[in-house]
Amino acid sequence: MDMIKLSIVSPIYNENSLVNDFAKEVLKVIKPMGISYEILLIDDGSNDDTWQYISELSSNKENNIKGIRFSRNFGKECALAAGIENAKGEVVITIDSDLQHPVELIPKMYEIYKQGGTNVVEAVKEKRQKESLLNRCFAKFYYAIFYQLTGINLKNASDFKLFDRAAIDAMNRLIEKEVFFRGISKWVGFNRKTIYFTTNDRKANISKWSFAKKIKLAVNSLTSYTTKPLLFILLMTAVFFILSLISSIEVFVRYINNTTLAGFPSVILLICIMGTAILMSLSLLAIYINQIFNEVKNRPRYIVAQTCGIK
Ligand code: UDP
Ligand code: MG
């Protein structure tokens, strides 16, 4: 049997009947393309009727819809990882299931790939979706730090991407447990092209990312990608070494000249500064130890509870 040409991979968490709309829209653009395809829907442990909708969709064999259901919510990154591991296509397109990524771009992305010479097509947001001020500030701050530390610009990046087999196989070889999809998809390299899109407003429900989830993703993505923050401890040590050298000389000179200051405030200040520096260093180490701990436990990234449409 010939290889499937195109796999659509989409993570889904508590989207209810929106799954039907999503499948309908995707089928509408993918069928006229006239190539073999599969639509792989990963239910990230939804606790609403999402799975019912997915299994109904997959029971209609004409649709080529397959479903994987996690035993609990493992997060979008793991859902995407499961998707690309199980996708059979020569080309894989990852896309959000909430209709915020315009499905009309699927044929365009495929077209770019068909022209040859491109392994990865990245859809970049022209304008970010409407967000609260806090979210916007947080995103800006985080992207600036991420860029400084890794040289990777994640601003306006999305998980709407096309990968050819070579890129998919390369990503499937990265087996870290705390996986950050946008990070690994950049890390593997290959020839890349960018196209732009404007995110649609969410049709139903609200964004699934709580602020706490975002913080967790931000810390994980950074620490799974780079150890540069650890160098910050060295830098801090150097700065404090110089400061303590200067202040020791001052104390010594004052001692010789008999002009010693009443020491209490400066001692308190020093204790505060040093205490903060030490605690900050320890926290940084703790974050990385946590990361190492999670990796060495070597647990699977996700647990599959059920599948449908997969042989
Ligand atoms: N999603 C998921 N697991 C989660 C959170 C979200 O699979 O724990 C899915 C969700 O169903 C959607 C996509 O990931 O298809 C993007 O989620 P969302 O729209 O909440 O994020 P945003 O658009 O705000 O980045
Ligand atoms: Mg969304």
Image (cartoon, grey):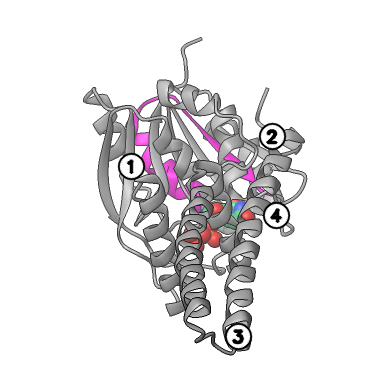
Question: Which residue shows up at 65% across the image and 31% down it?
Answer: 309
Give the residue type that dot 1 points to.
Answer: Glu
**Badge nearest the viewer, 1 or 3:** 3
Which of the labelled discs sits on residue 308, or is there none?
2
Which of the labelled discs sits on residue 122, or is there none?
1
Q: Is residue 264 left or right of residue 101?
A: right
Q: Which tag, 1 or 2, sits closer to the chain's start?
A: 1
Question: Which residue shows up at 43% across the image and 37% down it?
Answer: 185
SS type, badge 4: loop
Q: Is residue 248 left or right of residue 293?
A: left
Which of the labelled discs sits on residue 46, or is there none?
4
Boundaries of the magenta span: 22-44
Q: Which tag, 3 or 4, sits closer to the chain's start?
A: 4
Decide: marks 1, 3 in contact (CB < 8 A)?
Answer: no
Give the residue type that dot 3 points to.
Answer: Gly
**Badge nearest the viewer, 1 or 2:** 1
Decide: marks 1, 2 in contact (CB < 8 A)?
Answer: no
Disc 2 under 8 Å from ligand 1? The reply is no
Query: Quadrant location of ligand 1?
Result: bottom right
Give the residue type that dot 2 points to.
Answer: Cys
Q: Position of residue 113 (x, y in %)?
A: 28, 28
Which is more toward the observer, 3 or 264?
Answer: 264
Q: Which tag, 2 or 3, sits closer to the chain's start?
A: 3
**Quarter of the figure that contains the C terminus:** top right
Q: Position of residue 248 (x, y in %)?
A: 51, 69
Q: Residues within 10 Å of mark 2 (few under 14, many from 20)?
A: some
Residues under labels 2 and 4: Cα distance?
15 Å
Question: Which residue shows up at 63% across the image and 82% down it?
Answer: 268
SS type, badge 1: strand
| Circle 3 residue | 263
